[in-house]
Image (cartoon, rainbow, N blue to C red):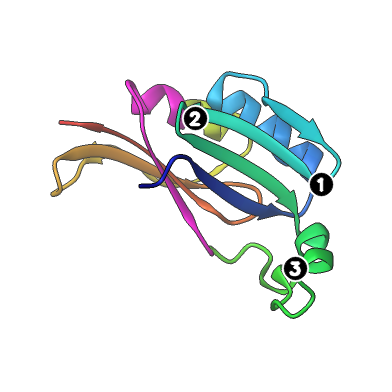
Amino acid sequence: MINKINIILYVGDQAKSREFYAIILGKAPRLDVPGMTEFELSDTCILGLMPEKGIKRLLPAMPDPETAGGIPRAEVYLTVPDPEVYHVRALAAGARELSPVQPRDWGHKASYCLDRDGHVLAFAAPL
């Protein structure tokens, strides 16, 4: 059994990404120290932001994430009460729209955008 899920995104600028996600999520991080910012998404899920340089120091054998800057490398799919509100917040915080909120064939209405580091963000709710 998995007790908690930590999703860690590698980011170019921890402070700018912290502000971006604080606006989108409408909350302050639960942890914000040099090298890691964490937002509690639920009782069992944490979204972490780690500087690209930090993960490279921690795992030097890993391919350098800085060389893929802006290229989508991950998607964070958030099921939320009102996807439109989150999507508008993301765009206001500087996200790039990929697709507005619309019905999807898997039974959700969902929007898609890119954060400042090229991670895909989806905001969805059941139809």
What is the three-letter code of the residue carrying label 2?
Leu
Ranked by sequence position, the earlier of labels 2 and 3 is 2
The alpha-carbon separation of the residues under discs 1 and 2 comes to 19 Å
| Front position in the image: 5 or 19 | 5
The alpha-carbon separation of the residues under discs 3 and 1 comes to 15 Å
Q: Give the residue number, with chain letter if any, for mark 3.
A: 66
Q: Is residue 52 left or right of residue 45?
A: right
Is residue 117 covered in magenta? no
Image position, residue 90 (x, y; %): 54, 33
Q: Is residue 7 above or below residue 33?
A: below
**Residues shaded magenta:** 73-87
Ranked by sequence position, the earlier of labels 3 and 1 is 1
Q: Is residue 124 visible?
A: yes
Q: What element carries label 1?
A: loop
Label annotation for residue 35: 1
Residue visible at 19% across and 32% down? 126
Task: For label 1, count other residues whose C-alpha is less than 10 Å away and answer few (under 14), some (14-19) or many (20+).
Answer: some
What is the three-letter code of the residue carrying label 3?
Glu
Q: Is residue 108 above or below residue 73?
A: above
Label annotation for residue 41: 2
Residue visible at 53% across and 64% down? 73
The alpha-carbon separation of the residues under discs 2 and 3 comes to 26 Å
| Front position in the image: 37 or 116 | 37
Image position, residue 122 (x, y; %): 40, 43
